[in-house]
Amino acid sequence: MDPPTHRSLPRIHRISARPGPKEDVLIIGAGPAGLMCAFALARAGVFTEGVRIVDQRPNKVAAGQADGIQPRTAEIFKSYGLSDRLLKEGTQLHVAAFYNPSKSGGIELTDRVPDVTATDTNFPFEVTLHQGAIEAIFLDNMRDMGVEVSRPVVPTSIEVDEDLVEDSDAYPVRVEYSVVLERTDSEPEDEEHNEIVHAKYVLGADGAHSWVRKHMRIAMEGEQTEYIWGVLDLVPSTNFPDVRNKCAIHSNNGSCMIIPREDDKIRLYIQLDESGLGKDFIDDASGRVDKSRAGPEMILDVARKTLYPFSIETPQSFDWWTIYIIGQRVAERYSVHDRVFIAGDACHTHSPKAGQGMNASMQDSYNLAWKLAHVLKGTVDRTLLKTYELERRKYAQDLINFDKKFAKLFSGKPHSELNSNGVSHAEFLQAFQTFGGFTSGLGVRYDESLIINPKHQHLAQKVLIGQRLPPRPLLRAADCRPTNLHDLLVSDNRFKLLVFTGDTHEPSQFTKVHEFAQELMHMASPGSFFAGFSSLEAMRAVFDIVSISSEKKETIVYNALPRILWSHWSKVLVDDIDMKGITDSGKVYESLGIDTTGAVIAVRPDGYVAAIAPLDATGVAHLTDYFANFIKPC
Amino acid sequence: MDPPTHRSLPRIHRISARPGPKEDVLIIGAGPAGLMCAFALARAGVFTEGVRIVDQRPNKVAAGQADGIQPRTAEIFKSYGLSDRLLKEGTQLHVAAFYNPSKSGGIELTDRVPDVTATDTNFPFEVTLHQGAIEAIFLDNMRDMGVEVSRPVVPTSIEVDEDLVEDSDAYPVRVEYSVVLERTDSEPEDEEHNEIVHAKYVLGADGAHSWVRKHMRIAMEGEQTEYIWGVLDLVPSTNFPDVRNKCAIHSNNGSCMIIPREDDKIRLYIQLDESGLGKDFIDDASGRVDKSRAGPEMILDVARKTLYPFSIETPQSFDWWTIYIIGQRVAERYSVHDRVFIAGDACHTHSPKAGQGMNASMQDSYNLAWKLAHVLKGTVDRTLLKTYELERRKYAQDLINFDKKFAKLFSGKPHSELNSNGVSHAEFLQAFQTFGGFTSGLGVRYDESLIINPKHQHLAQKVLIGQRLPPRPLLRAADCRPTNLHDLLVSDNRFKLLVFTGDTHEPSQFTKVHEFAQELMHMASPGSFFAGFSSLEAMRAVFDIVSISSEKKETIVYNALPRILWSHWSKVLVDDIDMKGITDSGKVYESLGIDTTGAVIAVRPDGYVAAIAPLDATGVAHLTDYFANFIKPC
């Protein structure tokens, strides 16, 4: 979808340009990627008057566009306390049903399997909710923090002063844009003026046709496919029995996908190129889709042939529809001098059918935002920003490689007696399940870098350094309330030090824990990293320290643990079964491969495992080496 | 606590009495019992301008008073969609810790056991939240429906015209009260006037010193005990290790109970009579507590002796405190001509330490409200109202009997070498666990009556007719989304017909289900109860029909079931394990004792099992007999 152009706005009275304020961060584009960044900065406490988010659309998206939320994204929403609303408004997909050609003509049910193959998550399903509703979750929560999107705002020029990019006090990015002020009773005409902004950082989250990307001359690498698909959003009246499940349908008349949606709606993805109809919608000159040549009824007619012998009625209205050609491209760079960044669709385009787009976009800016927040607060070095491209561009390349294989299987002809080279159900199902870890977002693993240290992996053998730490049921020691490791890994922009204290009921282990705590806060030692903070509060603004004991709930005395190892009584956990034996708790040490002599796991603010250390003086030294690389005690 | 008197209001200008409006229901008292009734009526759609709730307190309760929410009450909150807020704001109690005299003097930990012994609930714990916060949940949700409490309003007279009590169109209750209008800029003085209201029904939910009860000359039966206790709410600074658990402490200096609260507070219940101090606080003339003789510091000093060798610091301030003598009484009647009712503390007083008071109160009016709503809508006969006293007074008597035993064990001296008749830990623990089903509210079972029919119990052997139907994990057939039987038993004032269709994959069972459906809606038969409604919508306004199949999720075709057996695709359930094998679903038929030939369970609007019927023509006849007794098809 091309964004609406500024020309469509009525009755504009132009006035002369005026200088705008200095901004710490200017976010261009208020789609999922831009909003996640703005929200994350606001939550991190840096969205003061120095941060601004602008969008050229006069209003927020109302329908259509992206709609799939994968498990890892739901986990991120939970880490911000946003998942309750996501689950309340969204539809959950638990089943993927597969239909294939039947011998009697038409299609038949072949299989019903779990939609999400990954199990090690608290959200073992996909959630669908239209992009406008996702954006509203951010907008409403931002409004509660006093943050609004400025719109319509259309950028017109962007320049980076290369002499200033390494100066942390400088505002090296100059952006000019036009602002439209809406009519009021006293001002009967819309008023447009140009504004010049000097920013420390700019994020281009302005979609597949990114203005920021083009003006920064960042090329897209990759190519367009031959596959043409139509999309319809509607409330169906049908006798098709799996209409409330995600369906992958391979017929001899082309492929189709059904995605159940909120409010009893569904989305249909319908392959058009196979019907011979697809090319009719393409403008020969530009090679682009020309929507004026098609209509939702025509697309529904193709769907009818695919769904036969099941029927679907023409609805009174369509909620949204579009036609697209699959393109598979990744931006060659994600930043210019680590001052201008791009994120989301501006960086990568691919097939929407694996439901990855909105997820990849929000996770791009989730990755960037915590780093940017620390840089702006002065807690970390600017070099940390280099890890954004390193981590997210590699992910996007993996995504495109996955998409190429998956789109080919999906758009390919089904296997039959006439077409022995066609895609068999077994082949498709295997690909679906193999790619499950990837599509869920849970399998993402960041490479060794300034902030990923691969040492001491053996101390927590089943934890993968560079991957997000999985959820685990635990008990709070003081009140035995069931809780989860992920309830502690909230997105508060702090590093988490998870101190696995081992079996503190053993006197020798209890002594070991006290020695570790003493070493950690060795105030006498001038070179001590953790004692280098000006106060305990200053240290706790960067680190949250949590203790997890393998002692039994019947004997543990939570307040006998060293006070530095817990900031509040609720931060001492115990790895034991709950009082009623209902939750599956009591297996954290075992399932993470940690033995009862303990270990320390350092987790990044975004939930990824950063480093592992022994529970002793050498562990404190290792953690100091790791953190002192990029954190400045203050 | 005596309610504040009207005399304390400043600068009142009295004007002459004026007639007020006619009211369908007048609720006197906006504590938990009154608010539950008002909220329930509003949700049932009958809180129009014809219902009014008044309270003599100028403001809502801010701190102290009742605070314990038991599992059954949490289930009721969930059935109204209020449990998320309850859990978000409240503290969960999972552990009951027991301390007893140690040989070295002072007390020591004897045991940590589950606080709630009942397991068959989705809330296997107690929640604490102060009464003001509970009231705020109702007030906020009522405000969203346009309902507010009128206050301060002080009733002055009440009369029932006995000639009109059986006339369903009459307003036989005359209440006069004085209303204080607050000062405004244009009206510099508070204005008081008297108002006369004619009501169809009046609920006195006006507390232990109920004005309604006294003026209706309803006596309290029972007596006062010798036990004197003090209560303190504070944020503790202590080295006592179980301060975040519920604790029952028996010391040689008296007993003490700790109840953890929201915002890191705790409540201490401290026995005063054993210290010899208690009698100092009693006014000899009246036998009542005189709070002016005591203070929170004095009570804390007693607690310190009980808690020794652990220490507790004097806090900067106390959140709330009081002193009380345990009284154990039940009202001789709950209604006058089924026109004036009383509920909550107006009906029963007892020890607060088992956390029953607020629960019993809200469940009283929850029981009354659905009946009143149906009577006002004309869907049921007025005789239904007789079951309110029948069901709730028996419950209150059981509660007092329980309380007598429990209070004696709690206030009794601990067992020791010097006191071999004292209460042993084993004895106390056994009582605690035996009474668990009762204190959780889950064990309540209503007797046979107009609305409890004990027939056909054998068709669902593990369901107890008269008890609330327990929760069970299930799947929605259309999308395999895990759900729960309790998610279907929402408090929407409708009777639920749970049609256990059996294994519909079997052709003979499939036929049986279709025959049952046809019989249920036999339009040709003039005597047919269910076909007697004017439309399907009219029938569905009183009955929600849900189908639960024992077929497998891989084969079920939800839309092949008769359309009358589900109002929406989400109302066809399947008793099978979920797609990921994570929830404990797939055991509903087995655990309720229903075999695969099916059965029908009729559940009351308040979740209690009303009747069970076979899945055939005789079952339809049985259900007709049951419902035609009190429901009028319209």
Image: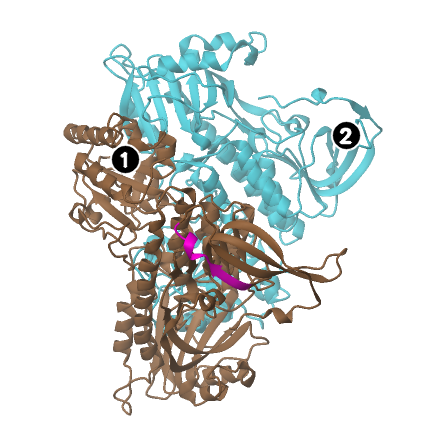
Chain colours: A brown, B cyan
In the drawing, what numbered circle is on residue B183? 2
Query: Toward which corner of the image does residue A366 lie, by quadrant?
Result: bottom left
Residue farthest along the right direction in this orientation: B16
- Residue occupying the far front of the picture: A163
Q: In the displayed structure, would residue B317 be above or below residue B591?
A: above
Question: Which element carries disc 1, helix, strand or loop?
Answer: loop
Estimate the x, y position of residue A441 in percent, counting from the top left. Answer: 33, 60
State yes or no: discs 1 and 2 in contact (Cβ < 8 Å). no
Q: Residues within 10 Å of mark 1 (few under 14, many from 20)?
A: many
Q: How many marks?
A: 2
Rendered location of residue B327, percent (x, y): 51, 21
- Residue visible at 50% across and 54% down? A26
Residue B171 placement, left or right of B476: right
Specify the amino acid type for callout 2.
Arg
Looking at the rendered structure, whether the residues under marks 1 and 2 are on a common chain is answered as no
- Quadrant of the snapshot with the C terminus of chain B: bottom right
* Quarter of the figure with the N terminus of chain B: top right
Q: Is residue A111 visible?
A: yes
Name which residue type carries label 1: Phe
Q: Chain of mark 2?
A: B
Residue nearer the viewer, B370 or B296: B296
Q: Which residues are magenta?
A: A156-166
Determine which residue is flagged by label 1.
A529
* Left or right, A553 with reference to B529: left
Does A164 lie within the magenta span? Answer: yes
Q: How many residues crowd mark 2 within 10 Å: few (<14), some (14–19), many (20+)?
A: few
Q: Is residue A417 above or below residue B602?
A: below
Q: Secondary structure at mark 2?
A: loop
Residue at 51 percent of width and 67 percent of height = A264
* x then y, percent, for residue A598: 19, 39
Q: Residue at x 32, y 79 (%)?
A: A408
